[in-house]
Amino acid sequence: MSPNKPQSSLDEPLIRRLNLNRPKLSRNREVQACHQCRLRKVKCDQTRPRCENCQIHERTCIYTQISRKPDSRQGGDRVIRLNQQGHLNNTSESQARYYSSSSWVVDVDVPDACRPPVGSSIGPCGKSGELSAPPTLQGGLEFPDGQAHLFVQLVEVDRLIDWYSKYCHLWYPIVDIAEIIISLENLRHNRSSPVGSLALIAAVCFAASCSANASGDLKPVLPVSTSSAWKDLADQLLLSNGYPRQPNLNTVRAAFLLALPSMADGRMHPDPGPVCVLLRATQSLGLHRDPSSFNFSPREMDSRRVLWWAVHGLDVAYSVAHALPPLIHATATDVQIIENNSISERKLIGTLIRVNSLISTIFQTVYGIRPPTGKDIQELDEKANTICTDEISTQKLPEMNAAEKFITMSQRMCCYKMLFILHQPYLRSTQWPQTSRQKALTACQNYINDYLMGITDPELAPYRWILGHFDVIHACAIVLQDLIQHPGSLESTGMRSLAETCFFTFSSDSHPDWAKLEALGSKAWVANGWTCPFQQGLDSLGADASLSDWDPLFASFIWENMLL
């Protein structure tokens, strides 16, 4: 070989032999089959809104317009060289694509930060590489190093996304299910997808796995992989996408889903760290500013508002759990409140936004650094009554399905929680308005009754994970504390029956906090002269038990003398 001979002439026989100069062949027609039929490679009758196959197998039928356009690039004049790794390296800037005449793939010159690692077909920039074989274990999450993206080939992913769309999406509808399905199909066929799609899909599977496990009786639909395995995978993918240093909407959505279930896993004091980081990530994306100030489409503005208010609701939930002021102050955001509309999945988020906004105000006014005044309490009570009048629906329609029944019940419980958080300081201050006792007890009783209905109704079993985000122990502790401080009252008989039902329904085996709550129940029974029904005596359970053991808000209220 002569050293002066041009390199391009050496590659010409290879180019002719591999036939790489011919133009790319592709069909130019729209895909008309639904997503489920294309995924399973079966014939679709294209019936809308639901094809025959999806009706028979009870699947979610979604039609997406995907058109394949011919490649307009002319590849005849390109010089392609063989690099040291055995790939074909294009000297001009172009995208990677496959050639049917060989197994070689064009290796595009991209920055090192965007280049996928060796053995991985999907990198941080969302580009696709060589077509990867599906994982050998259909239900596991054990993948070789750099091959975590192979989880999209699991059949379990389809089942979990379908479960999430039916039984989880109505709680905080921050995920576009249609876009998730399209991204999943693109990833399975090694096509480009938005950055963070892998992490978001894994986070959706994590939330759906937690929900399916909490449903209890639905054994046939339980996932094969554990929820902790899905969480570890989603955390790994979030880190590879640069979260939280370089967040985007998909990674913020994924981080929200990873932080959300911790409120329902039985811990009285969940870790606030992920929420603090999540809040800073959302602010770095400008989500705390109303999107109408920027050049966004109406659909993008709506999705950004929903995501911001979802993070705001998570911040309020952690504030209630820790008795700390919310990180988001009302003056730090100008995002418009989403109006409640006729769409079923938007009814609950509209209620959550209004309730959480007022709870945030209650934190600053009632549990803040200055004592509240009688005027403050009256104004908050009027706002709470307005929200309850608008959101609480007592109408029971016979044609209401399980989802509508659960949404209506959750709207009521959100309002009841707001009421007893506002009025429970009557147990700490003698100067608190006398009407607050009746309002707090009524709210607690209605809250507990709705919770019991959600637990015992088999039709609502798939929604038990969402129901777990409501803290029924807090309401029960308020009832027991009132029995201690107001023994022999007119309401004591009804509250005793309600407390006995709670202890009978939630045994000590189902939740460890119920066993500790028996100490407060023993004090209530002794104060009213009733025979103690609990297995252990008062001395062994602790005679100093009080509502402060379960409610940090109650413990943090220090204003004995108020400016009423």
Image: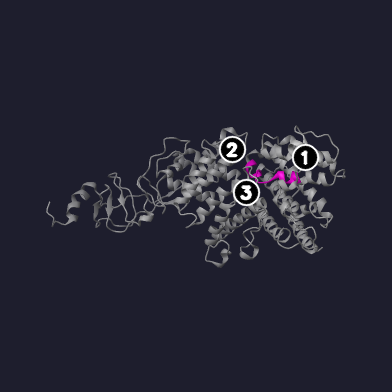
Which secondary structure lies at badge 1? helix
Q: Please report the residue visible at 65 percent of the width from the left and 38 percent of the height from the top.
A: 461
Mark 1 surroundings within 10 Å by alpha-carbon count, few (fewer than 14), some (14 through 19), many (20 or more) = many
User: Mark 1 belongs to which amino acid?
Assistant: Gly
Report how far apart the C-alphas of labels 1 and 3 lie in the structure.
33 Å
**Viewer-nearest residue: 91 or 143:** 143
Q: Residues within 10 Å of mark 3 (few under 14, many from 20)?
A: some
Residue found farthest to the bottom: 293
Residue 254 horizontal side relative to residue 75, left or right: right
- Please indicate whether residue 207 sits to the left or right of residue 10 in the image: right
* Dot placed on the residue nearer the N-terminal end, 3 or 2: 3
Identify the residue at horizontal 48%, vertical 44% (top origin): 233
Residue 140 drawn at (x, y percent): 47, 36
| Mark number displayed over residue 521 | 1
Q: Secondary structure at mark 3?
A: loop
Report the residue marked by disc 2: 213
Marks 1 and 2, Cα distance to the nearest angstrom? 30 Å
- What are the residue bounds of the magenta stretch? 463-477
| Residue 174 appears anywhere in the view | no
